[in-house]
Image (tube, coloured by chain):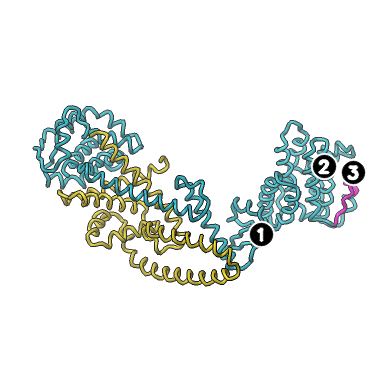
Chain colours: A cyan, B yellow
Amino acid sequence: MNRALPEMLQCSDMTVLQRQRARLKWQTEQLRQQNYFCELSGVFTSQTGFQQGGLMNGAGGGDSVLSNMGMSRQLKPDPGLETAWPELGKINMGFGSCGYGNGPSFDMNHAISRTSSCPPAVAAAVGSKPVEVKGNSEKMGSAVGRESFKKRKVEKLQNSKVVAEDEYKRIKASEEEEEESKITGPNTIKISNNKKQNSGDTSKDNSKVSEVQKPDYIHVRARRGQATDSHSLAERVRREKISERMKYLQDLVPGCNKITGKAGMLDEIINYVQSLQRQVEFLSMKLATVNPSLDFNIDNLYAKEEFPSCTTNFPTVGMAPEMTNHSPFLQFNPIQQVVSGCGVEMGMGMGMNSSDMALRRTISAPVSIPDASFLNTTCFTGPQQQIQPSAPWEVELQNLYNVAFTDTIEASDLEMEM
Amino acid sequence: MCPHTSLKQQFLKKWIMGLQRCSFSKKNMSILERKKTIKLSADIAMASARNGTTRWSRALISNASKDGSDNRLVQQILGPDSNTPAATTTNKAGTRRASVCKKIVKRSHQIRRRRRKCVAAAPVKAVTSSISEHLVRKRRQVLKTLIPGGEFMDEICLIEETLDYITSLRVQVDVMRSVASACFSQS
């Protein structure tokens, strides 16, 4: 990553966005390492930031602003550092002079490699001892990538990720915003770094409200200019929950997009629920009055839909006793014809999932009687009419279809009983 | 409604089963009775499709079981299914609801008292806000009467239940409409 960045920086046909992103990632790593090599890395990053700024000025105007930002960003946590390091050559001097037991030489090498790994191109541009630095960086670059700090390892990674995210978002914003948020950024992000933190809350960080969820409490930071009363905070949380759910309702209820007030939306919701309930009433009345046999038309659909699973259960449980009890008032002949005609259709209907189409197919089977409209009327008008059941009909059907189909036909028997 | 097909199928299956079980007993039913049966079985099917996860479904089933005449139907519909725990928890739910209701009433009194104090501070703003609050409150009352079991819910819960109830109603309407249209397209 550290090695990749300078090459990317050199690449001129890379978009600004990618460059910014790459730089962000690099800088987050820089930030990460600052706490460990605060003075050392601060020095170097400031210097490298400066160098980077120098390089980027050639590349693009906007970038230079960002690099300045980067520099200032890194300077802020370490205000006590020197900033006047115009030449890269001084790195080595600084390195030598800063050998005050910051840690093992290994760590210092890492520091150097990390900080100087970004702009070996910069070093080349500056033209002072680039080879050594570069060699160092390339040696250590991979090790750096793999190195893991023992303290707050996971946190830092998350921090860097969140910081990267946040910084990336804020790149688009104005400078001041960035500056402000950078100060508050690390603080809020450290606090809000728990697992329950979702991306929505990182965007909330921008508005200076962060919700941290520890196991027992919900920590809410008050917005600027708002009361910090616990009651008002709780009420605000509650209100936010309500408004979030109202948004869902807005999507659900048609025509609610233009209405913004709570009362208006509630009004729409009430109207919608009432209309739906009325529709249910109306449809049930419709189903009840005009088509008394409809109730078991649906049995066909049910059996068909459950064809792979429980066709055997369904008819035997429900149908068998009724078959014996009641005499089926059924027009067998037309149904026979229709069934034979629709056999293929029903087979096709098996695989389909859309209930409407399947319904049409099933209901078309017993109902659509091409040449026997009078039988339609008989079947619909009533339970009073009796038609002799014919056993051979059933036998014939069973010869024609497999068990599933016969189940559906038995269902259609019962449909006429109502 | 493509994402609801599984729910639709589930509802349809339960509805059919319910109709089967409760309609076979009577051969001759008046239109109104039939309509009532159909609607009841549809509602119960819808509610049981939720498996007692939502409050409105539990309230619906418990309300239906409370009436003497419908109780048999409900029992028949739900009978062999494992949804009867939903009906048995109604007693506990009832007492809990009563206590929740009391808490809500108490809380609303406190809020009203607090708001009156604030109102004294800023009269003009309070008038408009109180009007809007009044409107919202009225509508919330109406919504509570619409959603089954809604009288005992607080606001957040009410909105969640409304969401679920609306989706279930839509599924119900769609399925019933498709059944009706399929029927009538042939005749």
Distance between mark 3 and mark 1 Cα atoms = 38 Å
Query: Residue A310's spot in the image, x, y percent?
Result: 28, 43
Q: Are marks 2 and 3 in contact (CB under 8 Å)?
A: no
Please name the residue shown 31% across and 34% down the image: A350
Read off the chain for label 3: A
Displayed quadrant of residue A368: top left
**Image: magenta residue range:** A80-93
* Element carrying mark 2: helix
Label 3 secondary element: loop
Which label is found at residue A87?
A: 3
In the rendering, at what x and y percent does residue A88 appear?
A: 88, 43
Q: Earlier in the sequence, mark 2 or mark 3?
A: 2
Front position among marks 3 and 1: 1
Q: Residue at x 38, y 44 (%)?
A: B6
Crowd class of label 1 (few under 14; some 14 to 19; many from 20; radius 10 Å): some
Q: Nearer the viewer, residue B31 or B4?
A: B31
Check disc 2 and report the residue beneath it: A53
Q: Quick check: B74 left or right of A249? A: left
Q: What secondary structure is the stretch in magenta mostly built from?
A: loop
Q: Quadrant of the C terminus of chain A?
A: top left
| Residue A406 x/y as whole percent | 20, 36
The amino acid type of the residue labelled 3 equals Glu
Residue at the image position 84 percent from the left and 51 percent from the top: A43
Disc assigned to residue A191: 1
Q: How many marks?
A: 3
Q: State left or right for residue A195 relative to residue A188.
A: left
* Residue type, label 1: Ile
Q: Chain of mark 1?
A: A
Q: Is residue B109 above or below residue A82?
A: below
